[in-house]
Image (cartoon, rainbow, N blue to C red):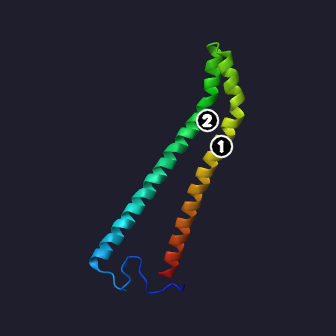
Amino acid sequence: MAEDKNFHPADTNGDGLVDAEEHRMYLEFKRKRLEDEDAMRDAQRQMTWYALFGMLLYPFAVVIADVINLDGASKILGDMAATYFVQLRQSLWHSLVKQHTKIKQIIQRKNKTSSLL
């Protein structure tokens, strides 16, 4: 199906004209989408910080368990470390790559826009 070049995303009834109601709805949906994307970025950033703090505090948990003579707990925490750190590293890396990719796309979009002017 060929895409019509005169089609505007706000034209919901397909008559080729964007009336005031369609324009209002389009702006509202766009605003909601931007709010949702912003909330998602904030949540991802917060989860990344929790993961980072967990990664930094994990060794202290092992030492504290050993100091208060919880040998079983320190052994379990020590055995679990390899899996824990690999998973956190992967999660943090994924988050950073995703952020970098989005920033790169924004910069490319701005460069395209400025080259058109």
The residue lying at 65 percent from left, 43 percent from top is 89
The residue lying at 68 percent from left, 16 percent from top is 71
Q: Is residue 31 left or right of residue 95?
A: left
Q: Quadrant of the N terminus?
A: bottom right
Residue 109 in picture, x, y percent from top left: 52, 71
* Contact (Cβ within 8 Å) of mark 2 with mark 1: yes
Q: Nearer the viewer, residue 11 or 41?
A: 11
Badge 2: few (under 14), some or many (20 or more) residues near its Cα, within 10 Å? some
User: If you read the primary sequence from the N terminus, does the residue marked by circle 2 or circle 1 appear first?
Assistant: 2
Residue 29 in picture, x, y percent from top left: 37, 66
Query: Residue 57 bears which disc, if any?
Result: none
Q: Nearer the viewer, residue 86 or 109?
A: 86
Q: State the SS at label 2.
A: helix
Q: Nearer the viewer, residue 71 or 95?
A: 71
- How far is the residue under mark 2 from the one under mark 1? 9 Å
Q: Is residue 4 left or right of residue 63?
A: left
Looking at the image, residue 91 lies above or below residue 2: above
Which kind of residue does numbered mark 2 sit on?
A: Met
Q: State the SS at label 1.
A: helix
Q: What residue is shown with label 2?
A: 55
Q: What residue is shown with label 1?
A: 89
Residue 106 in picture, x, y percent from top left: 52, 66
Residue 11 in picture, x, y percent from top left: 37, 79
